[in-house]
Structure formats: structure tokens, C-alpha cells
Image (tube, rainbow, N blue to C red):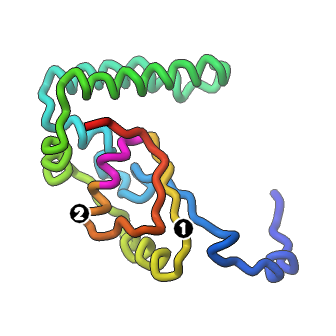
Amino acid sequence: MKYINNEKLNKIKLNTQNFYVAIDFDRTMTTLNSSDSWDVAGKLLGEEFNEKILNLYQIYRPIELDYNISFEDKTKAMEIWYRDCVNLYYDYHFTKKQLEDSIEMGNLIFRKGCLEFLKYMYNNNIPVIILSAGIGNIIEKFLEINNCYYNNIFMISNFIRI
């Protein structure tokens, strides 16, 4: 284990020019029993849609977790998985209204202290980068609904064009 050199650490002057927070959304900013953004988005698209999404999950999730698969093969499979999932939303004509309604009906729950953390980062002008394999549209809307989509927050995620 490598330990931090306290002398070196004390010399570092962190500020908004050399410091930012990178964080995941699903089950990091939200609780472990919270839905993820993919589940929330598909809530209003019906049983057939949910079966197709579940089928894709059952095919590709084991590949994602298999450490014996080469990086190249795993990357290719993950790209196919996400493309096929996003295409399902297009096939079922996912709308902006459904997105908004699904968030209200969904089970997205911030972790205790997350809203205060985001407010603190905003008040101290510290950039926050949300990196998510989830659906960025859902994450953005959820942040907006909770009045915490501040101008210091940047998002790298999958987005559905609606």
C-alpha cells in the first residue's frame, strides 16, 4: 500500500484551477436501493420493452463482469449493449414527456448528504464531473427537479435524443 506523503500534501494548494470532483451517479450519488437511470427511463414503455431490456442485461452483464474476456472483446460487447438499449428507446418512441413522468414515478433517491455536498461544491466553485454509464437525460432532469443542477456540474453520459 502506498501512503500519502504528508509533507507533499501540505504543500499542495487546492483551488478551482487544479481540483475537481469526478463522481458516478447510479448507486453512488443515489442509494443502493435506488433505481438506476436506465430502469427509470423505461418505466412507462410497457412490459414488452422491459422484457427486451432485461434480455439484453442477461446477455451482456455477465460479459461486463467476466475478467477473463479481453479488453477489446469486452469493449465491443459493451458498445453493442448500450447501442441496442438506446435503440430500444427509439423503437418505442420514448418522449420528453415520458422521461419527465418516469422520473416522478421512479425510485431515484439521493444518498444522505448528497444535496448538501453538491451545494457545497457549487458555493466553493469546485467543478463536479458526473461520469455515468446511465442515461444523462434522466440524471439532468433529476438534478433539475431537486434544484441542484448547478453551473459547476458537467456531465459525461449516454444521452437519448428526444
Q: In terms of depth relative to the viewer, which is nearer, 108 or 139? A: 139
Q: Quadrant of residue 54?
A: top left
Please tell me which residue is depicted at 14% across the width and 41% down the height of the picture: 98
Crowd around label 2: few <14 · some 14–19 · many ≥20 (10 Å): few
Crowd around label 1: few <14 · some 14–19 · many ≥20 (10 Å): many
Q: In terms of depth relative to the viewer, which is nearer, 33 or 38? A: 38
**Is 136 a magenta residue?**
yes
Q: Identity of the amino acid at label 2?
A: Ile
The quadrant the N terminus occupies is bottom right
Q: Identity of the amino acid at label 1?
A: Pro
Q: How far apart are the two marked residues, 2 and 1, measured between alpha carbons? A: 20 Å
Report helix, strand or loop for mark 1: loop
Q: Position of residue 154 (x, y in %)?
A: 48, 58
Chain part drawn in magenta: 134-140
Report helix, strand or loop for mark 2: helix
Return the mark for residue 127. Answer: 1
**Is 126 a magenta residue?**
no
| Left or right placement of residue 152 versus residue 107 in this view | right
Q: Quadrant of residue 158?
A: top left
Please tell me which residue is depicted at 15% across the width and 31% down the height of the picture: 45
Instruction: Decide which of tag 2 and tag 1 comes sooner along the chain.
Output: 1
| Left or right placement of residue 15 versus residue 60 in this view | right
Please tell me which residue is depicted at 36% across the width and 65% down the height of the picture: 149
Q: Which residue is mark 2?
A: 145
Q: Position of residue 79 (x, y in %)?
A: 49, 24
| Left or right placement of residue 16 versus residue 115 in this view | right
Q: Give the answer, above or below, for where 98 lies relative to 128.
A: above
The quadrant the C terminus occupies is top left
